[in-house]
Amino acid sequence: MSAWQDYRHRAETGESIVQLLGPTQIEKNRYYVKSTGEAIQFLAVNELALRGHNHEGGEEGLFLKFFDHTIKKDPKLAEIVKYIPDNTKYTSNVVQNEIIEALAKMVVKDIRTKYEKADSPGLCIKRDGARDRCNIENLSVVIRFVQISIPEEHLIGSIELNQLDAEYICNQIQSHLSELGHSPDNFVCQCFDVMSVARWGVQALLQNKVAYMGGFDGNFVWNRIGAENALICQSRFMLLESVLTFFLFLAVLSYLKFNNVQKSGVKYMGLFTYMLLLGIAGTQTWQIIGNRSIGHVTVLCHVLARIFALLLLPALLYVGFFYAHLHLLYRSGPHDQIMTSAFQASLEGGLARITQGQPLEVAYGSQITMRNVLGKPMPCWLHSHKSNYPIRQDLVVSNPPRSVRHGDLIQLVHGMTSRFLNTHDVAAPMSPHSQEVSCYIDYNISMPAQNLWRVEIVNRETEHGVWKAILSNVRLINVNTSAVLKVSQMSLHTVILISRLSHCRMKPKYIAVDVCKLSGASLPDWGFRQLETVADKVSKGYHQSMEWNVEEHRYGKSHEQKDREAELHLPTQMDISKNLSFLAKFSELQASLCKWKMLTFKNEETEHKYSSSPLDWITMDTNVAYWLHPSSNAQIHLIGNIMTWYSANLALCIYVILFLWYLVRRHRKIKDISEDSWTQWVQAGVICAGGWAINYLPFFTMEKTLFLYHYLPALTFKVLLFPIMLQHTYDHIISLPAYRHGFGALVLAWFSSVYMVYVTFSPLTYGQPSLSAAELGALRWKDSWDILIRKS
């Protein structure tokens, strides 16, 4: 507790100081008082001024007396005196200055050690000036910190001022503090005598040069974030936004620390902030390159340091994490189906277990299952039913889970029904712009079979490359209509027999080429609500849904249905090469992350109850229910502190207005603030306003299901802008003391309202206590908020 709190406690309880302090501390206090008394007595007897001013009068030999007195009290100095030659004249200026300098270093070291053990790293600097006998201005340097709950002040040195302008004094203060080993990052405030009145005085200049925490920038902002209900609620669940926000600001802080070193001598949303930091670093590097006062070697070091810290190191860490991931997690998992067949086959279990020992090269008569390469919106295999289209042609659809040389002609035979895969120039049921795909049934009608398909191996290594299971991606082009097989979404495995085409001759003619593909449309009840498979013209352009690859594969021998069914379950003895390099796996993982995370389209039919639009986040017109007690009204909602959200919006608007105002006036050569203040103002906007924009605006381009928690990283950047606005208003806009007092009162009232809102919504943040229906209704401050009320 502080000294005055300690005094009030003793006054109320009647306890003495002896009862509160231990014997060791009492002994230390007595020694301190005794030493202080002896020093004052010595100075008084020898007529030395307590403030150290050089008074006129007989003062010969006073240094020797003071030196002898100090030796008796300081064992370290006494040890040093033993090694001083006997012929040394202590009265000489050189010797006296050396001794004084040694004593000063010892005192400063002791003070720094004591400060490092202080209760908090906060440091207050104080200055006062006085002229010596030679009429030279000397500036005293005093630090103030809290030790064992008691503020302490220590004089750590004095600076001889050759010039008296504010810029020179400011530079000398900063240089002196650095020499003494005190980090400017720990400054919480400063106090000056006379020099801090003017706006352009020492205090204002030091504010710009030293990143100490001002009245509105320090604990104030963290108290404000600590009273933000949405951030508290999100951090209480095992969700990524809190960790993401932490590392976003750690990245910003790390770069700012890195950038400040040059003055003294170091969920994919994080990518947005990374790009922001790259932009800031690029701008600052360009300014360093254009500064001709910096040497070429220094410029090169700056550039290389930024390349390593911002490009090479993050890339090495990112790739390293995936390297460890792929080497430690080598078994099949529940979501492997979003990866390619080759990737799945490289994992233990799963597809690797099914395809183990199967032949590599697809041959005529092979039994295969065919998977669409696109795998979106979910993995798809070519499949057929015993059920038919309403026009009695065999039904072909695409189903989730169940392909010879380039240019060869093949027939695809459905293993269970022995029907050939066929397409003809008839509109598909649900996609009239595409051709229907079926397994051909001859009902004695005049419609010839069109079941010849030409194999095109997309990723072939040679002109007549071999169709390989797992590894080859192929397109199947119908010979008669030249349509390409294209697929969308399927659900059951199928077995297809590849038959050799003998004595097949085609007359040369120019025809349009069709491709079999997935239309994306769902069939009605007669098609079991599965997605439609169609054939499309090649002339319509290439799409990944036109590519297929073989997963399960074995050589067929028998022709009877029962034999074929039994043969499907017989193990094969040949092995298949399925090893992928780390770079191949890494590249595929990155493509899958982008495809399934960043480009996931929302389904209108299954829209989430608490999904929202980015426009709803600005004014917090939405909420998210996380938990509801099974028997009471206790519940947890993601609802922010409405005072914080709206004040952050106001801060952003005011910043933009002031920025444009300053920019226009500076263009007309009118400078309302100094150059250093303008640089800080721009940097604050780039980090806070830019951080908000780059973490918020991209959501307008994403057609995915969005929730309020996606806004939290951007919100935190905007919250940090508010205390910056307050500090700027206090320092550069409000100048009269009376107005400043009123401004401080308004800020205090505002912070009290933030705390009251936090307390009001705490039951929804922490899930306790349980509120009544009327109390929950009172918390519904907006009609768009969905508060759950259990029916009685």
Image (tube, grey):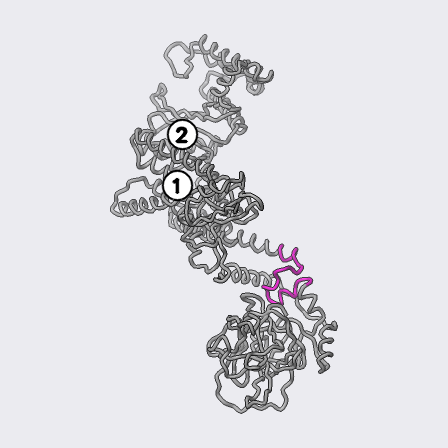
Q: Residues within 10 Å of mark 1 (few under 14, many from 20)?
A: many
> Residue beneath label 1, please?
722
Residue 12: percent from left, percent from top:
50, 16
Q: Is residue 774 above or below residue 597?
A: above
Give the SS element for disc 2.
strand
Disc 1/disc 2 C-alpha distance (Å)? 22 Å
Residue farthest toward the front in the current orientation of the protein: 792
> What segment carries the magenta color?
324-349
Q: Is residue 161 visible?
A: yes
- 302 or 582, which is in the foreground? 582
Residue 495: percent from left, percent from top:
65, 75
What label does residue 465 carry, if any? none
Q: Is residue 459 visible?
A: no
Q: Residue at x 47, y 49 (%)?
A: 786
- 783 or 384, which is in the foreground? 783
Q: Is residue 333 magenta?
A: yes
Residue 108: percent from left, percent from top:
50, 25
Q: Is residue 756 magenta?
A: no
Q: Is residue 677 above or below residue 520?
A: above
In the picture, residue 83 is in which quadrant?
top right
What label does residue 190 carry, if any? 2
Left/right of residue 714 with respect to residue 629 in the rendered view: left
Q: Residue at x 41, y 36 (%)?
A: 753
Q: Residue at x 60, y 71 (%)?
A: 381
The answer to whether the residue labelled 1 contacts the one labelled 2, judged by CB atoms less than 8 Å apart, is no
Residue farthest toward the left in the current orientation of the protein: 668
Amino acid carrying label 1: it is Phe
Number of numbered discs: 2
- 321 or 509, which is in the foreground? 509
Q: Is residue 314 above or below residue 180?
A: below
Q: Is residue 69 above or below residue 344?
A: above
